[in-house]
Image (cartoon, helix red, strand yellow):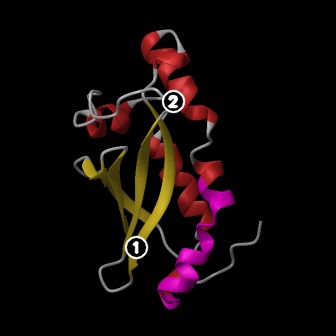
Amino acid sequence: MYFGLRIMQQNYNNVKGIFTEEVLSELMPPQRSDEFFEALYGDAAEGAYDISLAFDNYDPEKKVLSLMLKLRERPEKCLACNLTYGLPEVFARHPLINIEGMVRKIETLLGGAAKCLDWELGRTRTPAANLHTIPLIIRLA
């Protein structure tokens, strides 16, 4: 993959272009959901949602890159009944989710044009009954 874009000098569309579906899927592979629930419950089938990663925004003035973890309800499961509001703290330190490793990979994707200073996970949001999101905010230098 070639990501020679100069992020600090590019507009929103070019930065968004780095985070294709393929790249987002490499950063948060689909099988990671099953691995997470296998570790958590001992059975991947017990999981109520699938975890994926999506691009949200890039603010060049504030030097902030925003992605989001998407928790999409699995068929025959109940996302509303699941405890997703405490997940930012769990995801921030869980070795299988590995947010720190994901941020380091994102820094590599930026091709030396920016350094990731720090990151944080925001509060769980509920844009739909079958979809919860957790913002991943990355501050760049």
Query: Residue at the location (53% across, 84% down)?
Result: 13
Query: Residue at the location (51% across, 30% down)?
Result: 96
Would you identify the image quadrant in which residue 87 lies?
A: top left
Q: Which mark is residue 107?
A: none
The total number of labels drawn is: 2
Residue 125 drawn at (x, y percent): 25, 51
- Which residue is under mark 2? 96
Residue 47 is left or right of residue 4, and the answer is: left
Is 129 colored magenta in this rendering?
Answer: no
The foreground one among 36 and 62 is 36
Is 19 colored magenta in this rendering?
Answer: yes
Relative to 43, residue 131 above or below? below
Query: Residue at the location (43% across, 49% down)?
Result: 70
Point out the tag, 2 or 1, that comes first from the N-terminus.
1
Query: Residue at the location (54% across, 18% down)?
Result: 44
Residue 24 is left or right of residue 81, and the answer is: right
* Mark 2: amino acid: Leu
Residue 50 drawn at (x, y percent): 50, 37
User: Over which residues does the magenta segment extend?
Assistant: 9-24
* Mark 1: amino acid: Asn
Query: Distance of mark 2 from mark 1, alpha carbons?
Result: 25 Å
Element carrying mark 2: loop
Relative to 31, residue 6 above or below? below
Residue 137 drawn at (x, y percent): 34, 60
Q: Residues within 10 Å of mark 1 (few under 14, many from 20)?
A: some
